[in-house]
Image (cartoon, grey):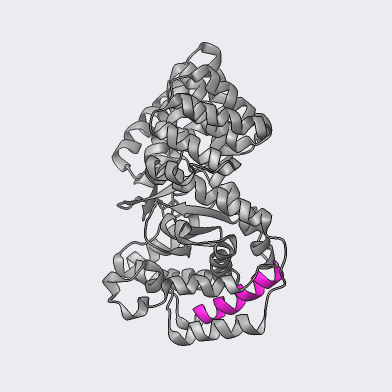
């Protein structure tokens, strides 16, 4: 699936409160390959922190500034700008270890509890929104992340205290050592932000505003690292996943000419992948396809590169071959909702009676695995319409608008769905849920 820019709602649909609030769109970059690569880097760190790697997602925010943060206990967010600035797998793991420490040490949970006890409406809405927004098994939760009901509440929530930062630093070093990651990487990350405290707040990167960077903190962290040197281990696998995530992100976000200059003599698999993406973005389908064929000849069992080939073919208006490529990806990894979403989209592009029916089944499975994708709901609504299921088409559209914070549109389509669906059925009840939440 292509890098998909999805709305990350600031105070979006607050399911527990049963209300909508105005949304300020930020965005996530959703790509199965990048997320899988980051998961591989994060897994040993999360296990060392006592967290379940299958429950904590690593997601990329489409922001060129440098920051990373956590919301609730189910996701760590890294700005794309920071991910591209970091120079090694160890540095990415240091960032993840620090944010995982905030989760493991209960900093976010305590802050949510404090906000729930507040009589301030903005703070109360923030607390409940954050509590539900990342419930990955809850299709009615916010379609992104509720990150603040007002500027003051947002700053209050995100800004860690110096005591929390000191505790997170100590815990992160412990997690890195337990995961056989050289803790020296943590000091290199802080060096990126060194000097930020001397700048006016308007000129600081968000990380400096939310993670206090005092000289004492940097000095203490260096002392921790010096007293706890890491044991060298083979980092070749981690280096591969880092290069893969960073390489694909840059191929989609930097100019194609920039990418092609940097991979001119790069014959590695990642270099070939980046070249294919760059040629595709230049509308040079022949060269893009040629590079993907060479890549898959070498790595025939890589689901994520079959998915990328499917995207390139689909966007080059070759739906038949795209369906086959996506099918190969699904056969290799049938539990990845982003791959299933791309497969469903390719089936819709093929647009036969059989492919449309198959698209319904595929997209329903994608939604069941990740109910927070507005792109899947958009395609599912189209698939239902093509297969003569107008009630379900209206319901999918209503839920998509709800996830995007488009309240009035959600009400219109939920009302239409309720009129067309059997009263008392599960889909009818979902339409009622949208209407109740909008009251």
In the rendered structure, does residue 178 fall within the stretch colored magenta?
Answer: yes
Point out residue 296 in the picture as x, y percentages from the top left corner: 62, 31
Q: Could you say which is closer to the camera, residue 300 or residue 119? A: 300
Quadrant for residue 316, please give it. top left
Residue drawn at (64%, 56%), measured in percent from left and top? Answer: 238
Q: Is residue 258 left or right of residue 140?
A: left
**Vertical arrangement, residue 92 with respect to residue 335, above or below:** below
Residue found at the very far front of the displayed protein: 265
Camera sees residue 322: yes
**Is residue 288 toward the left or the right of residue 340 in the image?**
left
The residue lying toward the viewer, choosing from 245 and 32, is 245
At x 41% / y 41%, what residue is drawn? 434
Is residue 300 shown above or below 106? above
Residue 262 lies in the magenta stretch: no
Residue extending farthest to the top is: 353
| Residue depicted at 65% across the width and 64% down the height | 45
Q: Nearer the viewer, residue 100 or 302?
A: 302
Magenta segment, principal secondary structure? helix
Marks counted in the figure total 0
Residue placed at 36% from the left, 79% from the top? 197
Q: Is residue 118 visible?
A: no
Find residue 344 and report its horizontal and vertical position in percent: 52, 27
Asked if residue 11 lies left or right of residue 29, the reply is left
In front: 181, or 260?
260
Q: Which residues are magenta?
A: 164-179
Residue 299 placed where, x, y %?
66, 35
| Residue 177 spot, x, y in % from top left | 68, 72
């Amino acid at each position: 699936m292509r890098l998909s820019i999805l709305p990350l709602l600031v105070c979006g649909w607050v399911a527990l409160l049963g209300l909508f609030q105005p949304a300020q769109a930020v965005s996530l970059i959703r790509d199965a390959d990048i997320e899988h690569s980051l998961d591989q880097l994060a897994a040993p760190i999360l296990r060392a922190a006592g967290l379940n790697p299958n429950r904590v997602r690593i997601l990329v925010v489409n922001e060129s500034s440098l920051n990373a943060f956590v919301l609730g206990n189910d996701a760590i967010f890294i700005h794309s700008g920071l991910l591209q600035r970091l120079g090694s797998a160890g540095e990415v793991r240091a960032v993840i270890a620090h944010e995982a420490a905030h989760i493991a040490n209960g900093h976010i949970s305590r802050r949510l509890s404090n906000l729930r006890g507040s009589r301030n409406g903005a703070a109360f809405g923030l607390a409940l929104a954050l509590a539900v927004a990342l419930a990955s098994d809850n299709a009615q939760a916010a379609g992104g992340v509720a990150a603040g009901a007002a500027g003051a509440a947002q700053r209050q929530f995100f800004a860690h205290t110096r005591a929390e930062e000191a505790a997170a630093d100590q815990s992160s070093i412990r997690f890195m050592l337990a995961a056989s990651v050289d803790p020296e990487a943590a000091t290199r990350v802080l060096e990126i932000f060194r000097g930020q405290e001397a700048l006016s707040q308007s000129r600081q990167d968000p990380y400096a505003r939310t993670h206090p960077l005092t000289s004492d903190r940097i000095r203490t962290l260096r002392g921790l690292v010096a007293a706890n040197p890491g044991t060298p281990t083979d980092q070749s696998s981690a280096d591969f996943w880092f290069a893969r995530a960073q390489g694909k992100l840059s191929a989609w976000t930097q100019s194609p000419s920039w990418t092609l200059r940097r991979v001119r003599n790069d014959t590695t698999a990642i270099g070939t992948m980046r070249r294919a993406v760059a040629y595709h973005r230049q509308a040079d389908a022949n060269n893009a396809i040629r590079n993907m064929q060479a890549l898959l000849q070498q790595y025939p069992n890589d689901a994520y590169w079959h998915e990328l080939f499917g995207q390139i073919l689909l966007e080059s208006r070759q739906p038949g071959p795209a369906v086959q490529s996506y099918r190969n990806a699904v056969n290799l990894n049938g539990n990845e909702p982003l791959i299933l979403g791309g497969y469903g989209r390719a089936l819709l592009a093929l647009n036969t009676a059989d492919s449309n029916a198959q698209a319904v089944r595929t997209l329903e499975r994608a939604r069941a695995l990740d109910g927070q994708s507005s792109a899947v709901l958009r395609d599912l609504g189209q698939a239902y319409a093509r297969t003569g299921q107008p009630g379900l088409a209206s319901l999918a559209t209503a839920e998509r608008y709800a996830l995007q914070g488009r309240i009035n549109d959600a009400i219109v389509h939920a009302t239409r769905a309720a009129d067309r669906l059997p009263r008392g059925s599960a889909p009818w009840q979902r339409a009622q849920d949208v209407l109740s939440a909008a009251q």
